[in-house]
Image (cartoon, rainbow, N blue to C red):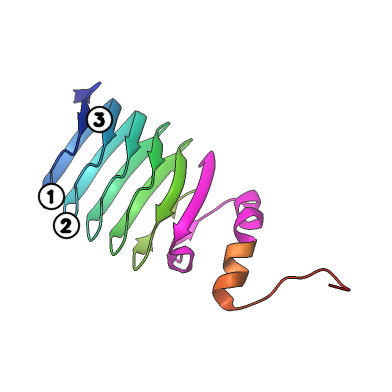
């Protein structure tokens, strides 16, 4: 268990984390690209610019934390749950998802990769919030009559 960890620019690229719990972390610029996370719980805290590009996440839970500009580009997410989290400007470009649960995300802001949400479950209200991004991705213009 890692409790109250603080740091900037932590380089854990290509690391393998298994059966780890991180609570109330305050981190910025964490490099976890090409890493493997299995049975990891991140609870509370705030992580800015989390780099998980090409990482493999399996049975991972993010709970009650704030993730600002997390980069999941090219990552494989399997049975990942975001509980009561804030996701700001998330990048899911080229990510693949299986059993990803976003339903209880408090704030869901996807900067890139809305087209990569196949394999995720979202709530009806999130669907409405994401509708403009889905429409834009499909090339559909949404206009009121007479515009």
Quadrant of the frame with the C terminus: bottom right
What residue appears at the point 29 percent right and 45 percent down from the top-left corner?
Answer: 50
Which badge, 2 or 3, comes first in the chain's sequence?
3
Comparing 146 with 33, the one in front is: 146
Which quadrant of the view contains residue 73?
Answer: bottom left
Which badge, 1 or 2, comes first in the chain's sequence?
1
Is 132 located above or below residue 43 in the figure?
Answer: below
The span from disc 1 to disc 3 (Cα, nearest Å) is: 17 Å
Q: Position of residue 27 (x, y in %)?
A: 27, 32
What residue appears at the point 48 percent right and 49 percent down from the top-left corner?
Answer: 102
Q: Is 59 inside the magenta-drawn segment?
A: no
Q: Residues within 10 Å of mark 3 (few under 14, many from 20)?
A: some
Which badge, 1 or 3, comes first in the chain's sequence?
1
> In the structure shown, which secondary structural element does the residue marked by tag 2 occupy?
loop
What residue appears at the point 16 percent right and 42 percent down from the top-left corner?
Answer: 18
Which span of residues is magenta-colored? 103-131
Is 110 located above or below residue 44 in the figure?
Answer: below
Is 78 located above or below residue 19 in the figure?
Answer: below
Q: Is 121 inside the magenta-drawn segment?
A: yes
Comparing 77 with 65, the one in front is: 65
Q: Is residue 86 left or right of residue 92?
A: right
Residue 13 badge: 1
The reply to whether residue 103 is in sight is no
Question: Depth-wise, is mark 1 or mark 3 nearer the camera?
Answer: 1
Q: Position of residue 6 (x, y in %)?
A: 22, 25
- What residue is pinned by disc 2? 34
> In the structure shown, which secondary structural element does the residue marked by tag 1 occupy?
loop
Q: Are marks 1 and 2 in contact (CB under 8 Å)?
A: yes
Q: Position of residue 132 (x, y in %)?
A: 63, 63
Quadrant of the frame with the N terminus: top left
- What residue is pinned by disc 3? 22
Q: Are marks 2 and 3 in contact (CB under 8 Å)?
A: no
């Amino acid at each position: 268990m890692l409790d109250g960890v603080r740091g900037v620019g932590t380089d854990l690229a290509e690391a393998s984390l298994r059966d780890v719990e991180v609570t109330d972390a305050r981190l910025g610029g964490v490099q976890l690209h090409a890493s493997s996370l299995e049975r990891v719980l991140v609870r509370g805290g705030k992580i800015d610019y989390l780099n998980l590009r090409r990482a493999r996440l399996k049975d991972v839970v993010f709970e009650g934390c704030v993730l600002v500009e997390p980069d999941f580009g090219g990552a494989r997410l399997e049975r990942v749950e975001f509980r009561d989290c804030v996701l700001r400007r998330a990048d899911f470009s080229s990510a693949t998802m299986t059993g990803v649960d976003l339903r209880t995300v408090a704030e869901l802001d996807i900067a890139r990769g809305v087209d990569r949400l196949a394999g995720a479950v979202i709530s009806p209200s999130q669907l409405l919030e994401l509708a403009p991004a889905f429409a834009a991705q499909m090339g559909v213009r949404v206009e009121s009559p007479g515009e």
